[in-house]
Amino acid sequence: MNRKDLRYLINEQFAGMAKAGTFSKMQSRAHPELRKILKQGHSDNTLEESSANSEMSQFSRSPSGRKVASAGSKIHSAGGAIYKIAEDQTGLMAETLYNISEFVEKLGGTLSSIGSLEEGTSVVEALPTVQELKSLQKAIQRLEK
């Protein structure tokens, strides 16, 4: 029940009592009914508001969501550490480590920013792509040969 419907019901209740000349007599009986209607309208609005928030948004505000964001920050930092190691390497190893660091930083950055999602944005857009993962796998396989 939305607010417009709720107002309509309340107005109808009072109008009916006024027409019947029983407003003062029925006021004591109508009061509990109106309270019930108001409570129902409030709980319906609360349900509408909570369903408007995505499950991801609700998760990001929870204690578990904050823990995931914290872990994401650590993953992002690990990507930075891998990047520094890549600076000491040469050739294919350096290139592969740079790519790994980029992938790890992107993943960690996405997880760490899970709590700062804006309405209409998607975590999926910030995640590394499947193509990036496949490229990493191929580069690592080349190093193993």
Image (spheres, helix red, strand yellow):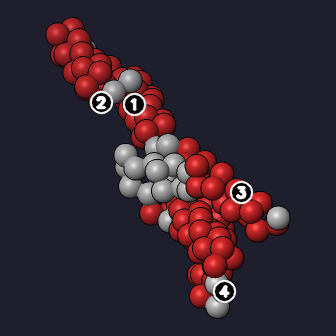
Image quadrant in which you'd find residue 133 = bottom right
- Residue name at image x 74 percent, y 63 percent: 142
Q: Nearer the viewer, mark 1 or mark 4?
A: 4
Task: Look at the numbered disc 3 and give the secondary structure of its residue.
Answer: helix
The answer for how far apart the CA atoms under marks 1 and 4 are is 65 Å
Residue 7 visible somewhere in the drawing: yes
The answer for how far apart the CA atoms under marks 1 and 3 are is 55 Å
Q: Quadrant of the N terminus?
A: top left
Q: Which residue is mark 2?
A: 3
The answer for how far apart the CA atoms under marks 3 and 4 are is 19 Å
Left or right, 60 with reference to 67: left
Q: Nearer the viewer, mark 1 or mark 3?
A: 3
Q: Choose the circle earlier in sequence order: 3 or 2.
A: 2
Left or right, 118 with reference to 112: left
Residue 29 or residue 130, whichever sits in front: 130
Q: Which residue is mark 1?
A: 41
Answer whether labels 1 and 2 touch (C-beta < 8 Å).
yes
Task: Look at the numbered disc 1 and give the secondary structure of its residue.
Answer: helix
Q: Which residue is mark 3?
A: 137
